[in-house]
Image (cartoon, coloured by chain):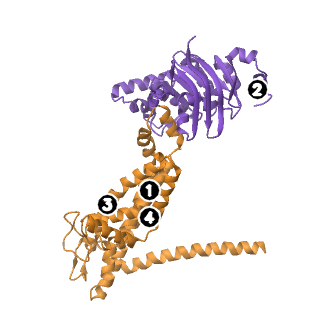
């Protein structure tokens, strides 16, 4: 009877893994099959034509890259500094706990809410308009909790014996953080940052009201211009226009590009992590 | 004989826990003073009072006077970073930074504002020579400190402490993670270092204390039981508890 129960348990575990794996695999295969036909260099490098029934996705690709770069430029320094503060400087435990609860809750906020927040604050209040800047800031806030958490973990994994050695030589806390803690936490911080870029690339709701436009003939010449973006482009192709027989394949092609982009970004993060693990001797 | 460190009525608490109890001790200059005692007697905590490393632990309370060169190191006018430059420390487990051998030794110089590359490499060489590591390390200064053996790493940590030209060096069981041969080399080095530095060493190893130290303090449950010349402590201890510890009745 016990043996039977064990077998039942293991079967259940195997089945769950199988289902998880199968659903992921089928998603990738499905998108690949549907989008594969569209993939070509000209698809990546051409503007959409004829009411988005022909041509490529170049402006959306560039838009997504710009938004991601903007988000990370904003969120990485802020997140790392916040993480340092939380790990190394905060005096009272109570404050840290409250701040951490706040950050964790921020991570759970639905992304469309971030979109509305971005619209109210960046677009309207700060007057940045629907623009790369507003979208980057909104995405930046969205990925901030991820970056803070990854940085905190990376910082706390630096052995305290390194810090002690530094203090014992007469280093200040700031010197110790700059010269001992941060260099050793860097691979972990970068991994977190890159993973969060992948997250930012795929988000639609936060840029819906803050950055994305249905169609534009030009690439943005300043951060105050609106852009096309890959996820929003898919949404636009599937909901607008009158020629689904042309638009739907383009949407799948776009989805595949987005998927590959996110995979590539995650791959970079994995490579950085495994390389630093191999190099690390403590 | 000049007393470098003079401690009167030193008490220390970690929260509610009274760790050091009314310690009076005078540590002589340019000699080796060993602190021995059973585990948990407060040896390491005592050592860490001398460079104020206990300040890093939350809830630490300290009272009494702790004078180095007749100045109270716990007074407000003391610059703690300057104090730690004057009072170096070597830890139980070798803890080089994950940097090159050269950068490990140069670290202290750099944080104290030395910028001149020539001076830095001169000082690094001097420190490595003084730590008896130069011959083994001179051809691979740019390789990682982790490529060194445990004993070499510990001597590197000593070189790192020497580079900022301290007056006192604290050793917290520096040989406990080393093999006997590395340990012997380290003891030899300590004997050379006392020419120029005041040395305080915490050790578990009674024979080691007997071999290398000039003075020995015996600590138990946060109290200083006995402090005297090493040969006297080991041949004719005054206190029964010291004798029991030395003869292995406990500890």
Residue identifier under label 2 = B245
Whole-number angstrom distance, CA of label 1 to CA of label 2: 51 Å
Along the line of sight, the residue nearer the viewer: A156 or A39:
A156
Give the percent coordinates (x, y) of residue A46: 23, 73
Q: Nearer the viewer, mark 2 or mark 4?
A: 4
> In this view of the protein, can residue A263 be seen by the observer?
yes
Q: Secondary structure at mark 4?
A: helix
Q: Is residue A145 above or below residue A186?
A: below
Q: Colour of chain B?
A: purple
| Residue occupying the point 79% across, 22% down | B240
- Please determine if labels 1 and 4 lie on a single subunit: yes
> Which quadrant would residue A62 be assigned to in this image?
bottom left
Q: Chain of mark 4?
A: A
Look at mark 3 in the image and give the residue it sits on: A69
The Cα atoms of the two marked residues, 2 and 3, are separated by: 66 Å
> Which mark is drawn over residue A106?
4
Q: Position of residue B84 (x, y in %)?
A: 48, 29
In this picture, is A140 found above or below B86?
below
């Amino acid at each position: 009877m016990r043996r039977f129960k064990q077998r039942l348990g293991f079967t259940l575990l195997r089945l769950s893994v199988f289902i998880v794996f199968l659903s992921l695999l089928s998603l990738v295969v499905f998108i690949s099959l549907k989008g594969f036909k569209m993939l070509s260099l000209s698809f990546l490098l051409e503007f959409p034509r004829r009411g988005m029934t022909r041509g490529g996705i170049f402006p959306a690709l560039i838009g997504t890259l710009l938004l991601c770069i903007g988000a990370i430029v904003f969120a990485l320094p802020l997140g790392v500094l916040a993480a340092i503060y939380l790990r190394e400087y905060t005096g009272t435990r109570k404050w840290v706990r409250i701040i951490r609860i706040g950050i964790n809750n921020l991570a759970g906020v639905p992304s469309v809410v971030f979109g509305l927040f971005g619209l109210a604050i960046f677009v309207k209040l700060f007057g940045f308009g629907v623009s790369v800047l507003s979208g980057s800031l909104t995405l930046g806030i969205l990925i901030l909790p991820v970056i803070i958490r990854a940085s905190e973990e990376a910082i706390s994994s630096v052995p305290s014996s390194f810090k002690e050695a530094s203090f014992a030589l007469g280093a200040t806390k700031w010197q110790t953080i700059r010269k001992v803690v941060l260099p050793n936490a860097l691979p972990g911080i970068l991994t977190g940052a890159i993973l969060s870029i992948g997250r930012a690339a795929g988000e639609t709701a936060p840029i819906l009201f803050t950055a994305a436009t249905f169609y534009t003939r030009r690439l943005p010449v300043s951060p105050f211009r609106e852009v096309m973006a890959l996820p929003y482009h898919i949404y636009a192709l599937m909901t607008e226009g009158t020629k689904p027989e042309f638009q739907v394949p383009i949407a799948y092609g776009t989805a595949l590009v987005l998927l590959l982009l996110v995979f590539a970004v995650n791959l970079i993060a994995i490579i950085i992590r495994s390389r630093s693990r191999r190099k690390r001797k403590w | 004989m000049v007393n470098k460190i003079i401690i009167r009525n030193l008490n220390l608490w970690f929260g509610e826990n009274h760790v050091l109890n009314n310690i009076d001790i005078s540590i002589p200059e340019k000699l080796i003073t060993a602190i021995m005692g059973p585990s948990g007697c407060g040896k390491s905590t005592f050592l860490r009072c001398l460079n104020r490393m206990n300040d890093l632990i939350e809830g630490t309370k300290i009272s009494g006077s702790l004078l180095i060169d007749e100045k109270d190191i716990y007074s407000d006018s003391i610059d703690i970073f300057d104090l730690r430059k004057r009072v170096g420390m070597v830890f139980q487990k070798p803890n080089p930074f994950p940097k090159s051998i050269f950068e490990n030794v140069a670290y202290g110089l750099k944080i104290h504002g030395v910028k001149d590359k020539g001076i830095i490499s001169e000082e690094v060489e001097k420190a490595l020579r003084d730590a008896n590591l130069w011959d083994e390390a001179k051809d691979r200064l740019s390789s990682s400190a982790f490529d060194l053996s445990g004993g070499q790493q510990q001597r590197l940590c000593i070189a790192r402490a020497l580079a900022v030209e301290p007056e006192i060096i604290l050793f917290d069981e520096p040989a406990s993670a080393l093999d006997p041969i590395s340990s012997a080399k380290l003891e030899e080095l300590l004997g050379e270092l006392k020419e120029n530095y005041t040395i305080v060493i915490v050790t578990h190893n009674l024979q080691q204390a007997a071999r290398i130290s000039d003075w020995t303090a015996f600590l138990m449950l946060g109290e200083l039981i006995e402090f005297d010349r090493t040969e006297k402590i080991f041949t004719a201890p005054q206190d029964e508890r010291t004798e029991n510890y030395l003869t292995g009745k406990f500890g």
